[in-house]
């Protein structure tokens, strides 16, 4: 039995029914983007008979990912669809990449029972091994001020930034530039320590996954062929490596991204609003849908927002008040 989506507004319905080819959904706060993502997934699974395991759905936070899983599970159960969320590519970018690494650990530098370090673990590890970093020539020149803990925080920021931009320390070391050589040695030292102590951090999860896919053609082909549709929420908060993985996995250009180019809040963590601003330029046939009906904010707030957009250099985007 087909689903008609009678509660969707025209813009939501347009996004839900779009199946083939790239799709950009611009969705401000309160415009029902999660509703649209869930129902677009239901349209693929129920109306288009797509295997749930062939759909890749990523969002930025664990909370949002859990909400997606819960809402999708509840809807699929209504239609007696046989599925297992543990077998689906659904979650945060980090959790999906970690799943790929665990399933393919024999092809990585990791050993069994490797540890996953969060940001604090990572910084404390650098603190414990600060002597190794201090051996790098000109270290005190680059990290002159602050306590040892402050220096470790700055080292951490530099390492994660370079890792997430896919900078190869060998390229830096081959340069004649003093700065490049220093940061190349910084990355090299950290990588050797990370492999030696058998852990992975949140930045390295994505980079190691990306490198694994590029270096192992058989594995890459297997994973790519197991995914027919890629959907990414909060695309304005993705970074360079996440964009590369998304394009790599969307073999048939069935890539749908959702976001608000006015709301990138994770730029300090490497997010770049460029990803969403330039998304359509990567394709010749990209469809763009703007969700403009606001179901959350009071009409006076919406009016103020629209007036503010008219008097600034912001993009020409307006909400419609709906109840």
Image (cartoon, helix red, strand yellow):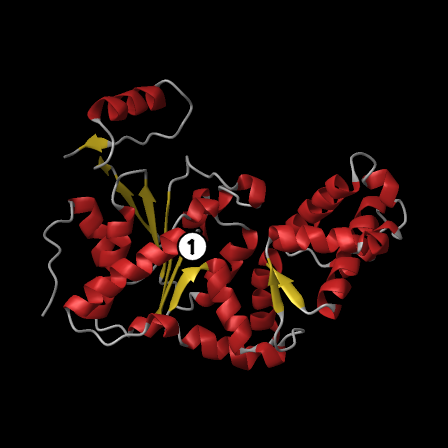
Residue at 78% across / 60% down in the picture? 188
Which image quarter is the N terminus in? bottom left
Which image quarter is the C terminus in? top left
Locate residue 41: give its quadrant. bottom left
Locate residue 18: give its quadrant. bottom left
**Image side of residue 13 versus residue 135, left or right:** left
Residue 255: horizontal and vertical position, in percent?
A: 38, 59
Residue 51: horizontal and vertical position, in percent?
A: 28, 75
**Image side of residue 118 versus residue 63, left or right:** right
Residue 42: horizontal and vertical position, in percent?
A: 22, 63
Residue at 28% across / 74% down in the picture? 83
Q: What residue would you read off at disc 1? A: 62
Residue at 30% across / 19% down in the picture? 307
Residue sitting nearer the eye, 210 or 194: 194
Residue at 47% across / 59% down in the picture? 93
**Residue 34 to residue 74: above or below:** above
Q: Is residue 306 visible?
A: yes
**Image side of residue 193 versus residue 7, left or right:** right
Mark 1, other Cα within 10 Å: few <14 / some 14–19 / many ≥20? some
**Image side of residue 147 versus residue 246, left or right:** right
Q: Is residue 284 visible?
A: no
**Tag count:** 1
**Residue 1 to residue 173: above or below:** below
Locate residue 211: give its quadrant. bottom right
Residue found farthest to the top? 311
In what element is the residue under mark 1? helix
Residue 154: horizontal and vertical position, in percent?
A: 72, 42
């Amino acid at each position: 039995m087909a689903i008609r989506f009678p509660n969707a507004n025209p813009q939501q319905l347009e996004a839900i029914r779009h199946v083939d080819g790239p799709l950009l959904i611009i969705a401000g706060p309160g415009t029902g983007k999660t509703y649209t993502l869930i129902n677009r997934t239901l349209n693929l699974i129920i109306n288009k008979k797509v295997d749930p395991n062939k759909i890749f759905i990523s969002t930025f936070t664990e909370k949002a990912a859990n909400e997606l899983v819960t809402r999708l599970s509840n809807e699929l159960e209504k239609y007696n669809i046989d599925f297992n969320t543990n077998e689906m590519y659904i979650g945060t970018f980090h959790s999906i990449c970690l799943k790929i690494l665990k399933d393919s650990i024999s092809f990585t530098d990791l050993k069994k029972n490797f540890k996953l370090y969060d940001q604090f673990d990572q910084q404390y590890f650098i603190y414990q091994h600060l002597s190794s970093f201090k051996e790098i020539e000109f270290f005190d020149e680059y990290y002159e001020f602050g306590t040892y803990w402050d220096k470790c925080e700055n080292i951490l920021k530099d390492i994660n930034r370079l890792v997430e931009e896919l900078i190869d320390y060998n390229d830096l070391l081959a340069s004649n530039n003093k700065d490049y050589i220093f940061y190349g040695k910084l990355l090299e030292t950290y990588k050797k320590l990370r492999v030696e102590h058998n852990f992975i951090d949140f930045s390295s999860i994505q980079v190691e996954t990306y490198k694994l896919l590029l270096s192992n053609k058989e594995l890459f082909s297997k994973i790519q062929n197991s995914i027919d549709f890629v959907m990414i929420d909060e695309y304005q908060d993705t970074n360079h490596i996440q964009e590369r993985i998304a394009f790599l996995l969307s073999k048939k250009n069935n890539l749908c991204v959702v976001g608000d180019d006015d709301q990138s809040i994770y730029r300090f963590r490497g997010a770049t609003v460029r990803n969403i601003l330039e998304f359509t330029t990567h394709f010749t046939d990209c469809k763009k849908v703007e969700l403009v009906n606001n179901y959350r904010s009071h009409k006076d707030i919406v009016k103020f927002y629209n007036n503010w957009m008219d008097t600034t250099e912001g993009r020409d985007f307006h909400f419609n008040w709906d109840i």
